[in-house]
Image: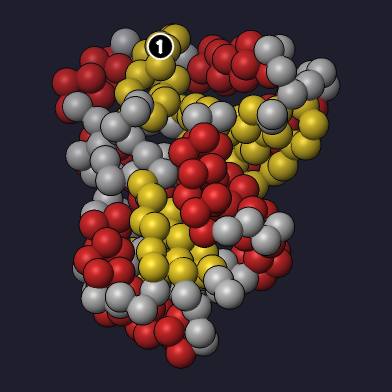
């Protein structure tokens, strides 16, 4: 009989409630300051990272390979026969390759390592839907076939307060960032098929960017029933405003407020980020 483990990382922005409900194994990214290193969402909160920005902007790194080895050793001891791992986009991190290598060292567990090609709740929604399939008793092979199909039904868009943090983290072209700030152009950022950030649209000013992200969501929701997820990085009031507007739309089956994003995402997106994820329902 199959015993399937589900693995992801802290950038999926899953709530403790969801993690505990489905028994999801979560690998922690690292937040690195000049004098100390922290485990993401274990030793430090996103709010603390934002408060510390005025003193130091930290860097981040993927979970340690030893953490991955330790997790697989634990799964073997607990009798797991299969593992499904859904990771942060390879366009943003090396965790996918790290888990692939780890899985190859543990032949007793048949593994499926999947690149979400997304981040935050764009990744997290996929993990949660996969968890539901495991709970329903679907087989490993059935779930492996279903995951890419779920991925096609997920849309994610976000805005940031400033492009400076994406520039510093090497997540966006320096020229695009400089021009954007000079003209007060605010991109609506999406994630392409390769799992990299791109400008889905551009508007002028913060207010227009918030209006535009709502209009994009409204257009998708108008075409069919959706679950909707909203999260932010030090932009709670604006996130609640967006939540209230989306709540009024028809075809919104479930609406979730994800709260503040993980510290790792906070490091690279900076304060003022606001994102929305839409899952088209079948």
Residue sitting at x 46%, y 38%: 148
Q: Residue 185, position in %: x, y? A: 37, 13
Left or right: 35, with 189 as reference point: left
Name the residue furthest bottom.
77
Residue 271 in view here: no
Name the residue furthest front.
1
Residue sitting at x 17%, y 27%: 174
Residue sitting at x 19%, y 27%: 173
Q: Residue 97, position in %: x, y? A: 24, 57
Estimate how packed mark 1 is, as few (under 14), some (14 to 19) or many (20 or more) residues with alpha carbons within 10 Å.
Answer: some
Say which of 40 and 106 sits in front: 106
Residue sitting at x 41%, y 44%: 116
Position of 186 relative to 101 (above/below): above
Say which of 256 and 264 sits in front: 256
Q: Residue 119, position in %: x, y? A: 43, 43
Q: Residue 39, position in %: x, y? A: 39, 72
Residue denoted by label 1: 202
Secondary-structure class at tag 1:
strand
Position of 144 relative to 107 (above/below): above
Say which of 50 and 30 sits in front: 30
Total marks shown come to 1
Left or right: 191, with 1 as reference point: left
Say which of 131 and 119 sits in front: 131
Colour scheme in the image?
Answer: secondary structure
Name the residue furthest left.
175
Identify the image quadrant of the C terminus: top right
Identify the image quadrant of the N terminus: bottom right
Residue 89 in view here: yes
Position of 108 relative to 26 (above/below): below
């Amino acid at each position: 009989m199959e015993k399937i483990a589900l693995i992801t990382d802290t950038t999926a922005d899953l709530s403790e409630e969801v993690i505990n409900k489905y028994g999801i194994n979560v690998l922690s990214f690292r937040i690195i300051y000049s004098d100390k290193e922290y485990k993401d969402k274990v030793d430090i909160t996103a709010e603390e990272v934002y408060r510390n920005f005025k003193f130091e902007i930290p860097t981040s790194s993927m979970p340690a390979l030893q953490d991955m080895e330790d997790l697989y050793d634990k799964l073997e001891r607990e009798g797991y026969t299969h593992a499904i791992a859904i990771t942060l986009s390879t366009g943003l991190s090396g965790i996918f390759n790290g888990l692939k290598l780890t899985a190859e060292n543990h032949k007793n567990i048949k593994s499926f390592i999947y690149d979400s090609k997304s981040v935050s709740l764009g990744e997290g929604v996929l993990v949660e839907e996969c968890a539901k399939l495991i709970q329903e008793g679907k087989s490993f092979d059935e779930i492996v076939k279903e995951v890419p199909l779920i991925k096609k039904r997920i849309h994610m868009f976000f805005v940031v307060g400033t492009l400076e943090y994406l520039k510093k983290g090497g997540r966006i072209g320096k020229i695009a960032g400089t021009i954007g700030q000079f003209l007060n152009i605010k991109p609506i950022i999406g994630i392409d098929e390769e799992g990299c950030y791109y400008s889905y649209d551009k508007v002028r000013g913060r207010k227009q960017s918030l209006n535009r992200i709502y209009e994009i969501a409204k257009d998708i929701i108008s075409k069919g029933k959706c679950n909707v997820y909203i999260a932010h990085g030090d932009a709670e009031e604006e996130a609640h405003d967006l939540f209230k507007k989306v709540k009024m739309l028809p075809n919104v089956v479930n609406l979730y407020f994800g709260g503040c994003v993980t510290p790792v995402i906070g490091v690279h997106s900076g304060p003022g980020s606001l994102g929305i994820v839409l899952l088209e329902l079948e």
